[in-house]
Structure formats: structure tokens, C-alpha cells
Amino acid sequence: MRIALFVLFVASSFCGNGQPLKAVIKIDVSRKKGEIDKLIYGNFTEHLGRCIYGGIYEPGSPQANADGFRKDVIQATKDLGVSIIRWPGGNFVSGYHWEDGIGPREKRPRRKDLAWGDVETNEVGTDEWLQFAKATGAEPYFCVNLGTGSLDEARNWVEYCNAKTGLYYSDLRAKNGHPEPYRVKYWGLGNEMDGEWQIGHKNAEDYSKFALEAAKMMKWSDDSIKLIASGSSNYVRDWAEWNRTVLNRLHNWVDYIALHNYSGNYDKDHNKFMALTTTVENNIKITEGIIREVRAKYKMKKPIYIAFDEYNVWYRAWNDKKLEEHYNMQDALVVALYLNVFVRNAHIVKMANMAQLVNVIAPMMITEGKLWKQPIYYPLQLFAQNCQGTSVDAWVETDTYDVGNFKKVPYLDVSTAYNKAAAELIINVVNRHPDKGVTTTIVNQTGKLTGKAMISEVNSNKLEDENGPSSELVKVANKETSVNGNTIQYTFPAHSFTQLKIKLQQE
Ligand code: AHR
């Protein structure tokens, strides 16, 4: 085999303090980890702040389509590559009665939402939101109210959405102008029911008993639906016991267990902030272990996966009821780190939803009528557009650091995928180092790298750099280069996310 050495040199890597660090990444596409489900590039819209009203929906705006949904949001959602959108909450759903949101709008009740303290007008309900989801091309994912909701309510919602006409609720749907079933496939059994902040919070036993009865009735209404159990969001000392109880009770009925996590730079410590996703990955592995335990105990054939259906950076706007977080370059790195975790664990994480879509802890904002993209938009877009196929193992040798309880955190965080259909190798690399580049030798061990390589980098001069309605400091820089051989030398600049997409010819 001919081995050529290509030096793709990045000048900025030698800026900052001292010499760049060194690393080696070895990739063998025959070391397959699991198929990447496109549903890991999902999102979430909740009735909260300006996400629905003034976000996806703004009838008076020049951007509104005939249904009142903003065309710029729809377009930016499509461009982001969003595969699935969760709705209507979030904490909101635990006090939401879906029947408030159907039928003639003028008859819909105004209610106080106890989760966020807003008034819910119910202008956007099931039929309207599904029009929005359809316009974006994303799969709808509904979460039912297991806080104050009833078993009948959960089951009736499935009938309203999915049954052919001829039943009470499907006929009601037809009467409301939608004779054809929507076929909503993904249904969550409550939101964050492990959290004391949740309306109708329950202990694990009580939640499991209630969710089991809801699951039975929902599946008996439509056995083609996929159910997602509410798993851990409250990482107290015995958090994993919640998942064990839930899975022991619900294993026959559910297809996924949900995990949630938000990260924040509370200590203003870059290295610590960059290490937080190592805990996220560990929590995924702990949950995977419990899934294995339960499947073995009950000799199960049916798989159960993890739906990481809320994740993001969220800390500055923690006490602001509108949750309008302004993201910077540093936060974009954390989002890329989350996505690396999901790709590395693609065998078990089969859905993930960035929380949320617009204005509320979101990749896109609307300021004075104008849509602009936050730094966190770009890593998600690169992953969703390019990182498809099979997750493959990467062996990474890199310098590490210790911070607080985090030991041996690697400066380079890597995930890799092989897209057989496109004959492409995708390498996603976060350089956590705040001011040093990492000069890296990348060795491909099966097949031959050939043709063109696309290099896309999300970076900015300073970690604090933000975007706004009239300036975009954090964005994607693309360059193309030719590759012919199996060893590449590349310097990943300080505090960057880089995605390499290279043609790979199998021998
Ligand atoms: O996404 C914001 C909130 O975070 C959601 O309503 C809730 O599920 C989580 O605590």
C-alpha cells in the first residue's frame, strides 16, 4: 500500500502560547460501532417564552406563511437538517390538555401554564403544529401529559392523530378539516417525571405504574407507535435507580428511555466546561448497562434505545422565564462535544433533540423581526448534513488534563463515521485547548483515502465571541484539498470544531 503524507497546514495553530500539542488518530472503518440514526439530529419546540408564539408562529409578521408560521424559521430548520421535532413540552406538557388546542380557535380556552407562568392561548394546537412540522420535513414526536393528564387523554390523543375515520376522535379530526390520519409515530410518556419541579412529579414506582397503563392503552389504540419512557433528568446520587425501576416495569412496552442534560460554565472555568460531556457519556453507558441488565433478566429480543431528547448549554438564562440564552464560541464547542458523544454511542443512542429550536435556548433567534443564527447552529448543521452512515471506532492518542473531579480529559475529542453510500469518511474533532493547536497525524487503516477532502471549521478569534442580528463572528469556514494516501497531517486550531469529509475507496 502506498502511503503518502499530506500536510494540511493551518497557520493559526501556531498562534497562542508555545508550541502546538501533538496527537495521533487511527481509524479503521471495519471497527463498526453502530448505525447512526438520523433521529439523533432532532430538535424540540415547547410552549415557553417566544418559542411557539413569536418564534415558529407569528401570523402578523411579513415572514408568516398562509398558516401563520414563519417562513424564515421553517427554512432555517430545513437548512439545519432537523430530522424530528418534539412537542409540546417540556415542563409545559405536564399541565397541558391537548383537547384545549383543537377545533374553532375562538372557542379555545386561555389557561395559565403553571410550568412557566405564561398564559396559553391554545392558538397553536395539534392540527396547527403538525402543519409546521410538515413544512419543515421533520418527523413529529409528541409527549403526553402524565403529570395532570389522564390515561384516557393519552389514548384519545393517539386516536385523534392516528386512527382512520369512524371513531369518535378520528371523526373529530376529520370535522376539524383533517380526514387523513397524521400517523404520529413517536410518543413520549411524560416529561422529566423524576424531577420535583415537574407538575405531577411522581416517585419511580408511581410513575412506572401510571406510564405502564398509559403505554398499554396508547399501543392498543395504534400498535405501530414507538414509545419513549421518561428517564433521568435529575442527577441526584441514586439517579440511575429511576431508570432501573422504569425499565423493569415498562420494558415490554417502550422502545426508548429518555435522558436529559444541560451544561453550564458556572465556575467560568473553560477546561471544566469542556469536560462536562465526559459525565454525559458516562451516564449513557450506565443507562446502557441497565438496559442490558433488564433485557437479559427478561430474555428480551426487542431492543430498547436511549432517546437523549433534551440537551444543550443552558445556564445564563436559568432564572429568566424566557430562557433566551445568547451563545458564544465556547458553547458551540460544547454542542459539538455532545454530538460527538451521540455518534460514538450510536449503537444505543438512537434519538437526540437539541432543546430548543428558536429563541428559547436555541440555535436561531428572532430580533426585531429578523432571524439570525447562534454559534450552536453550526456544529449541529455540520453533523446533521454530513455525519451519516456507520459510527466507527477511532483510537486517539492525545495530551490530557485534569480539572476538579475530571481526570485525563483528552484535548482532542473525536467521533468518526463511514458513509458507505457516499464512500466518505467523516472525522469530527473538537480541540478543547483554549489557546494551543494540536498537530495530528490521522492514519486510515482500511481502504484508501482519495480524491477531495472537505474541511469545515467552526471557530472564532475569542471563546466569548457571539453572533447577533447584524454580525456573525462564529460561523463555518470551508476549504477543500486533495488527498491521496492514508496518512494525513492536520493541525486542529485552538478551541475549534473541525469536520473532515474525505472520499474513502474500499479495497
Ligand atoms: O427545555 C427547557 C426545560 O428544561 C424543559 O421544559 C424541561 O423538560 C427541562 O427541564
Image: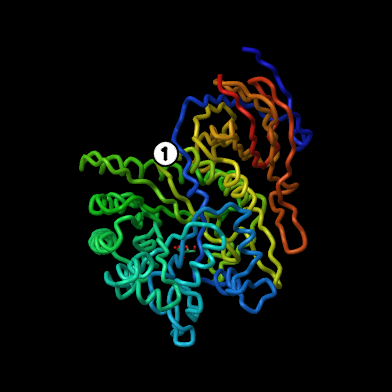
Query: Eyeballing the image, is 442 above or below 200?
Result: above
Placement of the C terminus among the 4 image quadrants: top right
- Which quadrant of the view contains residue 157? bottom left
Left/right placement of residue 479 relative to residue 382 reads right
Q: Is residue 220 left or right of residue 487?
A: left
Question: Looking at this rendering, what residue extends furthest in the bottom direction?
Answer: 107
Residue 203 seen in the figure = no
- Estimate the x, y position of residue 202 in percent, counting from the top left: 29, 65
Displayed quadrant of residue 5 = top right
Q: Amino acid at mark 1?
A: His
Question: Which residue is nearer to you in this view: 432 or 421?
Answer: 421
Residue toward you, 342 or 271: 342
Q: In the rendering, at what x and y percent does residue 196 appear?
A: 36, 66
**Residue 362 falls in image quadrant:** bottom right
Number of other residues with Cα within 10 Å of mark 1, as a class: few under 14, some 14 to 19, many 20 or more: some
Quadrant in the picture for the N terminus: top right
Query: In the rendering, at what x and y percent does residue 140 appear?
Result: 46, 60
Q: Which residue is mark 1?
A: 347
Q: Is residue 255 visible?
A: yes
Q: Is mark 1 within 8 Å of ligand 1?
A: no
**Above or below for 488 versus 412:** above
Identify the residue shown where x is 52% and y is 59%: 355
